[in-house]
Image: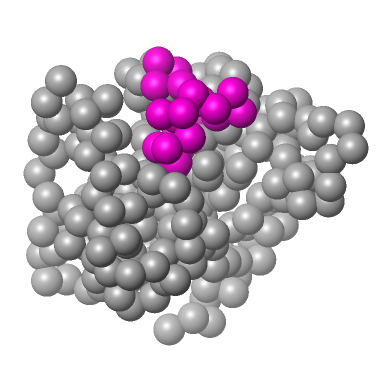
Amino acid sequence: PPATATPYPTPDGTTRTLKVPILMYHYVSVPPAGSDRVRHDLSVGPDLFRAHLVTLREQGYTSITMTELVYALELGAPLPAKPILLTFDDGYRDNYENAFSIMREEGFVGTFFVVTSLVEERNVNYMTWEQIVEMKEAGMEIGSHTTHHLSLPTLSEEEIWRELTRSRALLQERLGQEVHSLAYPGGRFDDGVVHLTHAAGYWIAVTTKQGVTHHSESPFTLRRIRVRGSMFPPDLLEAIHYWMVEAQFEP
């Protein structure tokens, strides 16, 4: 189906700084036996994930999408009193099987960044197009994590362009709506990558740099808070609090 259009949030000339936590998840499952430390670090079990959401709701947080954030940054669109974003990198199958159902039950939305080549290959560890479309139709936001999850700064301009545009075009074709958000693979970017990301039609992009401060003049270098598998709800709240306090001392 043709992509449905959302008006581009042309900056209104007002410089804005927002302090909004963007949480970065990867796997939402218990790591298989024998998993290495990296996998354990990237994995939040379903019960713990639900506990995160319950705690965030009890603390008064309301989840928003990347599109809502960019409209707030560029146009001053209103946000809830305590907005928070939940983002998921890579498009693992457990994002559908575990995270999606828990989020619906607990009343949260999130943004899922998909590596399109892995979906096309029907890799069993990653979500299918049918699952991704179902999530979109239920109110989840789908973003690009490029076509092949390569380190963009190491590629030629032509290769970067292909990684950015082909993934976005395929997502839009499959979803029937425009795709505006990107997560840089491995969080790696440089000025050239940012320029091409803007030119490729994206409105907003996230990095793996830690922090909560976002500027209207730099919507392509947004910071996030890494959620680790060892973080119980008090640890998650402590991390959010730490970066919100740090933000008071940022320019």
> In the figure, is residue 250 to the left or right of 47?
left
| Image point (32%, 48%), residue name | 181
> Which image quadrant for residue 166?
top left
> Which image quadrant for residue 143?
top left
Q: How is the image coloured?
A: one colour
| Image point (15%, 20%), residue name | 1
Q: Nearer the viewer, residue 166 or 247?
A: 166
Magenta region, residue range: 108-131
Locate residue 185, reporting x and y percent: 48, 56
> Which image quadrant for residue 204?
bottom left
> In the figure, is residue 27 to the left or right of 61?
right
Residue 217 appearing in the image: yes
Q: Nearer the viewer, residue 195 or 219?
A: 195
233 over 174 or under it: above or below: below
Locate residue 132, reporting x and y percent: 41, 24
Identify the image quadrant of the C terminus: bottom left
106 over 250 or under it: above or below: above
Residue 112 in the magenta stretch? The answer is yes
Residue 48 appearing in the image: no
Number of marks: 0
| Image point (31%, 43%), residue name | 167
Residue 75 in the magenta stretch? The answer is no
Locate residue 225, reporting x and y percent: 59, 57
| Image point (30%, 75%), residue name | 192
Locate residue 146, reporting x and y percent: 39, 49
> In the figure, is residue 232 to the left or right of 111?
right
Q: Nearer the viewer, residue 109 or 41?
A: 41
> In the figure, is residue 170 to the left or right of 189?
left
